[in-house]
Amino acid sequence: MTVKSNHVTIKGIKDGLVFLLDDKCEFNLLLEELRYKLEHSHQNILTGPIIHVDVKLGSRNVTEEQKQAILDILGQKGNLLVRSVEAPEPETAEGTNGLATLSGIVRSGQILHHEGNLLFLGDVNPGGTICCTGDIFVLGSLRGMAHAGFGGQEEAVIAASYFAPTQLRISETISRPPDEWENRETSMEFAFLLDGKMQIDKITNIFRVRPDFNVFKGV
């Protein structure tokens, strides 16, 4: 069977590969060509040492299932490690403060980039990184690195259900976790900047730092 080769473009960059995926063709056709190219083309670069991969979807809107289908195909080549997937921002409902939602696991060597505020349902493993221009909320374990406020937003916060990061960064301020974080409480916590220094507090006190968040006061 002959598969047309104009929907998937593989480009080499200094520290890995970029997969440019056509955003106009039918999705199943895109998957078919991606699978074909990985099996029959570029064998000289798709074998051997670990290669970091950036996937660019153009203007194509994909569901989490479609995104996972792409990652599954790339994952069949053991030396390809996907570090980013660029796609249009998902539409968010009013009242969420522009909060996008993603789920999964950020594994060692992977970098999740996001423009805006992010609610991540899953774990960030040691060696994994989340980098956002806005706030980061992790409903799971944060054991890797998190960088909120990328681009200079010093009011950004980083929160996680289990807080044990290897490094935190808000705007340009970097903080490595102290040793006592190994024995912290199990309640959800968040990091923020106060007078240019990194601070940690319980999530229930976030309204003191971010008065723009609505507060439930009961009746």
Image (tube, grey):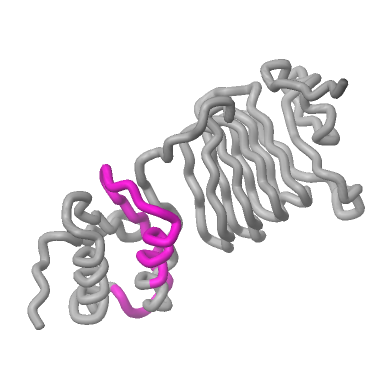
**Percent x, y for residue 105?**
58, 60
* Front residue (pair 203, 177): 203
Q: Is residue 138 left or right of residue 58?
A: right
* Front residue (pair 42, 24): 24
**Percent x, y for residue 74?**
36, 70
- The image shows residue 19, relative to residue 60, as above or below, that is below
Is-magenta flag for residue 53? yes
Q: Is residue 143 left or right of residue 205?
A: left
**Placement of the N terminus among the 4 image quadrants:** bottom left
**Percent x, y for residue 156?**
64, 27
Which stretch appears magenta? 46-72
Q: Identify the image quadrant of residue 99.
A: top right
Q: Residue at x 39, y 59 (%)?
A: 67
Residue at the extreme front of the image, as rendered = 219
- The image shows residue 115, relative to residue 209, as above or below, that is below
Q: Is residue 157 left or right of residue 94?
A: right
**Placement of the C terminus among the 4 image quadrants:** top right
Q: Is residue 143 left or right of residue 130?
A: right
**Percent x, y for residue 172?**
60, 29
- The image shows residue 200, relative to residue 180, as above or below, that is above
Q: Identify the image quadrant of residue 214.
A: top right
* Front residue (pair 157, 2): 2
Q: Residue at x 63, y 22 (%)?
A: 154
Q: Identify the image quadrant of residue 19.
A: bottom left
